[in-house]
Image (cartoon, rainbow, N blue to C red):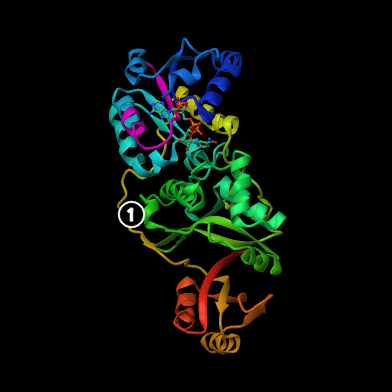
Amino acid sequence: MKKVVVLGHGTVGSGVVELVERNKEYLMDKYQQEFAITGILVRNLEKHLGKGKDHLLTDSFENLLEQKPDIAVEVMGGIQPARTYVKTLLDLGVSVVTANKDLIAEHGLELLQAAQAGGAVLHFEASVGGGIPVIKPFRESLKGNRIRSIIGIMNGTTNFILSKMYDEDLSYGESLRLAQDAGFAEADPTSDVKGYDAARKLAILSSIAFDKAISWQHMGCEGVQDVQPFDVANARAVHCKIKLLAIALRSGHNIHCSVRPALVDKHSFLGHIDGENNAIEIEGDAVGKVMFTGAGAGKLPTASAVYGDLLDVLSEKANGILPLNSDVDYQLIPYYNAPTQWLVRLRVNHIQDTVDLILSSFSDHSLQLHHLNSKDNLFFLVDTEDERQLLQKLAPLQGSSSVEELRHFLIYR
Ligand SMILES: NC(=O)c1ccc[n+]([C@@H]2O[C@H](COP(=O)([O-])OP(=O)(O)OC[C@H]3O[C@@H](n4cnc5c(N)ncnc54)[C@H](OP(=O)(O)O)[C@@H]3O)[C@@H](O)[C@H]2O)c1
């Protein structure tokens, strides 16, 4: 019997407890093993009393330690006190399963080192993509590959918002309110809508994929809060949808990582990922492109990934992977480093001057110019070698008095 303590009894914690109870017999039949939940840590004891778990609840971490657990599940969220608790557990040789992307993105290396030193293991499948298995495939099935790219929709809240803007012609504010009413966005949605949540997940995945510690603070990160209804209309006009893409791309010794609203072909696989769903496409040099998709959050989907990690602890699988030795010679570059098409959108006060400027700046490129509705919304499509070339060509427009605002969107087909 393995004694399991659960730190947190909110959305995910209650799902983990439910799944452990649900699978009790199955685990015994199949593995002759048993997980016994011996303690649940919460912050506000009163809130949880009288719901059938009173004998397990505590608001004291020290009480949990006194149980001498074999495994701890950390599903409290946030950095502190989660970091201290997880470190203490690992130092004591207690294996930890966590769903906490903030903690892993910020302190994953330190905690994995603590796990190694303490003779414990640390697994964190649910920290990226909720119920979607994506970290474990890197650790197991994709090991024979050099990873070229990771491109994904990694945040359900923003995907829900952008889907509402596209499907129902709503503004960003209206869509955000709907997401909050439906429980897909928190009261303070900053981390989701500004792209930080997706950036943390991308940092975890790309650190694993490229064997280099990549910090989310060092990547370009644009959220969805400035996406306008006419951006959605522009995307529709060229048979695309806007999605918040998390992108990691390796080319030689350069790695580009960014989170940004981008256009995806509405008929492509990513173009069909709507609402709160997530999808992650990984390209390896041997396997080609593989896609992982499903529920990126939610009580039981996330608990499903946590439970899988618990079984890995049982079967004594090795530690979760992050590059403990991170002196790989890669350079993180700020611009998208592959040939692609862009949509450039401008708000202008003088159309003819702007068009002349666009044509002269891009004289050696073929352009598709579009002019929808009004002078407020001029856009064109252009192919470039990479984003740096695009930015060089856009520089004269940025400096022109006839251009009031300019924004470019990557098009991923
Ligand atoms: N929700 C999802 O779908 C999802 C998906 C993937 C990953 N995750 C990750 O899973 C983790 C948990 O998310 P969640 O949605 O389950 O959060 P949640 O519903 O807010 O639950 C958090 C739980 O942790 C407890 N807690 C928080 N701070 C504590 C403290 N200082 N001491 C003791 N207990 C404390 C809370 O206690 P009280 O109830 O007493 O306040 C609550 O029971 C987060 O890291 C999140 O990023 C969540």
Q: Name the spot of residue 39 as percent of width and height, x first.
A: 43, 16
Total numbered labels:
1
* Residue at screen point 58% across, 45% down: 156
**Identity, as a three-letter code, of the amino acid under mark 1:** Val
- Residue 312 higher or lower than 283, as above or below: above
Split into 4 quadrants, where in the image is the C terminus? bottom right
Can the viewer see residue 292?
Answer: no
Q: With 44 as the anchor, is 348 left or right in this view?
A: right
SS type, badge 1: loop
Q: Name the spot of residue 282 as percent of width and height, x first.
A: 55, 51
Boundaries of the magenta span: 69-85
Q: Which residue is mark 1?
A: 328
Q: Is residue 396 magenta?
A: no
- Residue 168 higher or lower than 29, as above or below: below
* Residue at screen point 28% across, 26% down: 91
Q: Name the spot of residue 58 as percent of width and height, x first.
A: 41, 16
Of the pair 133 and 171, the residue shown nearer to us: 171
- The answer to whether the residue bearing label 1 lies less than 8 angstroms from the nearest atom of ligand 1 is no
Can the viewer see residue 58?
Answer: yes
Q: Name the spot of residue 243 as percent of width and height, x first.
A: 60, 57
Q: Is residue 79 magenta?
A: yes
* Residue at screen point 38% across, 17% down: 69
Q: With 164 as the anchor, is 84 left or right in this view?
A: left
